Amino acid sequence: WPVLNVYVPVMGTLLSGQNDGYKYLLDTIKGFYPNETVLGFMRAGGLTDVQALPLTLGAATLFMGTKA
């Protein structure tokens, strides 16, 4: 999370001039399920070839799978 602790608040403040909303965003990112848990949910739902692709230095993740 070190990159997120710096990147999200700094970039958010620079782009919007406000910091509060980006601290909230950072907190919600940290509170999200770990990638392996999400991939497990996807497998349990019947998806195959599941994968997680980190985006924006890890601030977001794209989860993909194939419907069987």
Image (tube, grey):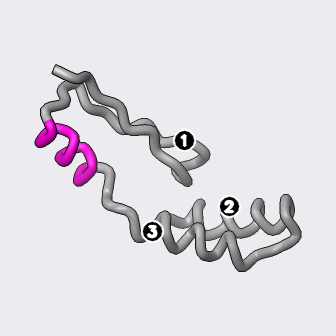
- In the rendered structure, the answer to whether residue 65 lies left or right of residue 48 reads right
Marks 1/3 in contact by CB < 8 Å: the verdict is: no
Q: Earlier in the sequence, mark 1 or mark 2?
A: 2
* Element type where label 1 sits in the image: strand
**How many numbered marks does the figure carry?**
3
Graded by Cα atoms within 10 Å as few (under 14), some (14 to 19) or many (20 or more), the crowding at tag 3 reads some
x and y percent of residue 46 in the render? 13, 32
Quarter of the figure with residue 62: top left
Q: Name the residue under label 3.
A: 30
Crowding at mark 1 (Cα within 10 Å: few <14, some 14-19, many 20+): few
Q: What residue type is labelled 1?
A: Leu
Badge nearest the viewer, 3 or 2? 3
Residue at screen point 64% across, 75% down: 23
The magenta segment:
36-45
- Could you tell me how far apart the alpha carbons at marks 1 and 2 are, in whole angstroms? 13 Å
Which disc is residue 55 wearing? 1
Q: What's under tag 2, amino acid-wise?
A: Tyr
Question: Is 38 in the magenta?
Answer: yes
Are discs 3 and 2 less than 8 Å apart at CB? no
Q: What element carries label 2?
A: helix
Residue 31, given in percent of the width and then of the height, sits at 40, 70
Q: Is the magenta stretch mostly helix, strand or loop?
A: helix
Which of disc 2 and disc 3 is earlier in sequence?
2
Q: Residue placed at 60% from the left, 75% from the top?
A: 24
Circle on res. 7: 2
Type of amino acid under label 3? Lys
Q: In this view, does 4 lie above or below 24?
A: above
Task: Tell me which corner region of the image, top left, top right, bottom left or bottom right, holds residue 44.
Answer: top left
